[in-house]
Amino acid sequence: MKISITKALVILMTLLLSACQAPKATWDKLAGPGLERSSWKANNQVHSELLSLPEPKGKVRVAVYGFRDQTGQFKPGPASSLSTAVTQGASFFLVKALKDSGWFVPLEREGLQNILSERKIMRAEGGWDNPDHKLPSLLSANIIIEGGIVGYDTNIKTGGAGIKYFGIGASEKYRVDQVTVNIRAVDSRTGYILNSVTVTKSILSKELNTGVFRFIKFKRLLEAEAGFTMNEPSQLCVLDAIETAVIRLIATGISDKLWSLENPEAINGPIMKYYLSS
C-alpha cells in the first residue's frame, strides 16, 4: 500500500493532536479525589479552600522555628548529587499558609536573631530606654508549629499505552511519585502535642510520543517524531500538602475544641464537612 508524504504527515499530526486530548482525563484519574490539580499554577483548589475558611472566634499566635526536609532524598541522575528531591524552603510555605488561613498570627522565629540584633542597635541609638518611649516587648507564641517533609517515594505507579500501524504510531507513559508532610501543634507552655496531621500528595509526570517510520517508495524512507513530557513541580505538591495539612489542622482542632468558630453553624459548611470526614 502506497502512501504519500503529505498523507503520512497528516496522519502523524492527527495522532499527535488526538493523543494530546487524553492526558487531562488520565491526569485527573491518576490524581484521585482530593489530589486533582486544576492547573499548573500555585493558586489551585486547595489554596482557594484555604482562603475560604470560616472566620475564627479569635486568632492564635504561632511560631515556626523550622519545617525541614527529613527524607534525605536526592534527585536521580543525571542531576547533581547535591540536588535534593524536594524544596528546602518549606517553612516559608507553611508560614504563608498559616497567615492566609486567617486563623493564625505567625511570629518570626527563623530570623529571630536578626530581630534581636536590630533591637540592640535601636537601644544603642538612644531614646528607647526612656520610660515614655520604651521599645515594646516581643510577642510570645501560644502554639509552636512543628513537623516537616517526612516522605518522598518515587515510582508509586507507572504505566502507559501505545499503538502502531504500518510504522505510524503514538504512545503515552505516566509516573506517580508521592510526598508526605506532617504538622504538629504544640502547646508552648506545657509542650503538650495538641494535634498532629499527616498529608500525602501525588506528583504526576507524563510523556507523549508520536512518530512515523515507513518506506513510502523504493529507497525513500519517511521518518518523523514528535512528543513532549510534563513533570509536575515538586514544590507545588509540597505547597499543596502543607496547605491541606493546615486546613486539616484547623478542622480537627475545631472538632477537638482546641479553637472555635465565630459562627458555630459554619462547621456544617462544605469545606469543613469534607476535611472532617476525609
Image: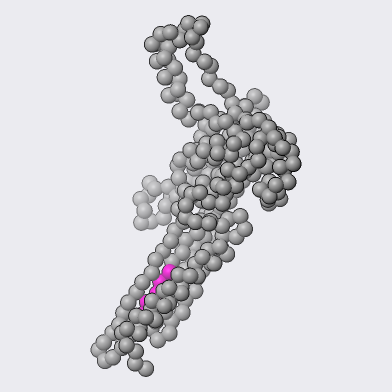
User: What secondary structure is the magenta-colored segment mainly?
Assistant: strand
- As drawn, the residue found furthest toward the bottom would be 1
Magenta residue check for 81: no
Please tell me which residue is depicted at 46% across the width and 73% down the height of the picture. Answer: 19
Please tell me which residue is depicted at 45% across the width and 50% down the height of the picture. Answer: 85
Residue 67, given in percent of the width and then of the height, sits at 52, 38
Image-quadrant location for residue 144: top right
Image-quadrant location for residue 207: bottom left
Residue 278, given in percent of the width and then of the height, sits at 68, 51
Q: Nearer the viewer, residue 223 or 190?
A: 223
- Above/below status of 108 relative to 94: above
Please tell me which residue is depicted at 43% across the width and 81% down the height of the picture. Answer: 164
Q: Is residue 46 visible?
A: yes
Please tell me which residue is depicted at 48% across the width and 30% down the height of the picture. Answer: 110
Image quarter (top left, top right, bottom left or bottom right) of the N terminus: bottom left
Is 55 positioned to the left or the right of 175 in the image? Answer: right
Colour logic: one colour
- Above/below status of 166 relative to 75: below
User: Total number of numbered labels?
Assistant: 0
- Above/below status of 34 relative to 140: below
Residue 185, given in percent of the width and then of the height, sits at 63, 35
Q: Is residue 276 visible?
A: no
Q: Which residues are magenta?
A: 208-212
Q: Nearer the viewer, residue 6 or 61?
A: 6
Residue 228, given in percent of the width and then of the height, sits at 39, 66
- Above/below status of 59 relative to 28: above
